[in-house]
Amino acid sequence: MKKLVILTGAGMSSESGIKTFRDSGGLWEEYDVSEVATPEAWVKNRNLVLRFYNERRQQLASSKPNEGHLGLARLEKYFDVQIITQNIDDLHERAGSTKIVHLHGELTKARSSIDPSLIYDIGYKDIKPGDNCEKGSQLRPHIVWFGEEVPMMDQALNLTGDADIFVVAGSSLNVYPAAGLINYAPATASLWLIDPKDVVVPVNRKVEVIKEMASIGIGVLTERLMKIYNR
C-alpha cells in the first residue's frame, strides 16, 4: 500500500468547535499564550495553567469528530495512513484512525512534573492542585509547551521521509518544527495542501492545493487520490 502521511493542524478540529489560538475569537484573544502555555507560566501560576487546560478538556468532552476526521479514518482502507498532528485533542482516535503521532502532546493525559516518563490517561477529568504522581510531584498537562523540546519529532521525520504522499490539512505552517516537515518528504512524493486560506508552503516543489475546509477538502483529496491510484 502507498504510504500516506498527513500533517493536521488546528483547522482540522476547529469545525468540531475546538477553539484555535490564532483565529479571530480564538484563545490568543482570551489568554496570553505566555501565561498558559510555557514552562515559565507553570512556575509562575500553576493554578491558572491547570484551569486553562481543564477548560480545554471539558470542551473536548462535548466535541465530536467532523467529516474531515472521519474521512481520514476511511482512507485506511486504501492507503497506509499515518497521521502526524499538531492538535492535542483525541478526535482522530475517536474517528477511527489507528496510527497517530501527537507532536504537541495529548490533552487526555497527564504526566509527572519531575519524571516525563510517568504519563497517565485521565480522559476528560480535571487535573487539580495536589494531584500527584507516584513520586509525589504535581501532575501537569501532557502538553509540549512553547520553549520545550518536541519528543516525537524524530518519529515524525522518519515517517515523512518514507511518504509516497504527504498532505498538510488545516495547518497554517507557522509553528516550527512541525511546519518544516514538508521539506523532508521524498522528491518522489506528491504534496498536497488543504486549507481555505492562503498558506505559504516552505518548499520549492509543486504542491496540489485544495482550498477548502478539512470537512470538505478531505473528501476532495480522497476522490483525487482514488483516481490517481486506481482505488
Image (cartoon, rainbow, N blue to C red):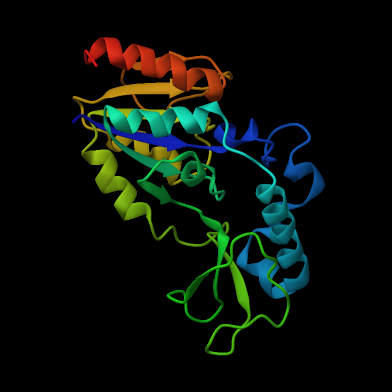
Q: Is residue 93 left or right of residue 39?
A: left
Residue name at image x 66 percent, y 42 percent: 63
The answer to whether residue 202 is visible is: no
Residue 132, image x and y in percent? 62, 83
Residue 57's spot in the image, x, y percent? 67, 55
Q: Give residue 52's quadrant in the image.
A: bottom right
Image quadrant in which you'd find residue 49:
bottom right
Instruction: State the image coordinates of residue 93 (x, y, percent, origin top left).
Output: 47, 46
| Percent coordinates x, y for residue 210 in the rendering | 46, 15
Residue 18 sits above or below residue 137 on the image? above
Whether residue 229 is visible, yes or no, is yes
Q: Please state if 15 lies on the left or on the right of 134 as rendered.
A: right
Residue at 55 percent of width and 33 percent of height: 12
Question: Is 220 on the left-hand or right-hand side of 52?
Answer: left
| Image quarter in which the N terminus is found | top left
Foreground pick, 224 / 73: 73
Residue pushed farthest top? 227
Q: Is residue 41 above or below residue 168?
A: below
- The residue furthest right is 30
Q: Residue 22, located in which quarter of the rendered image?
A: top right
The quarter in which the C terminus is drawn is top left
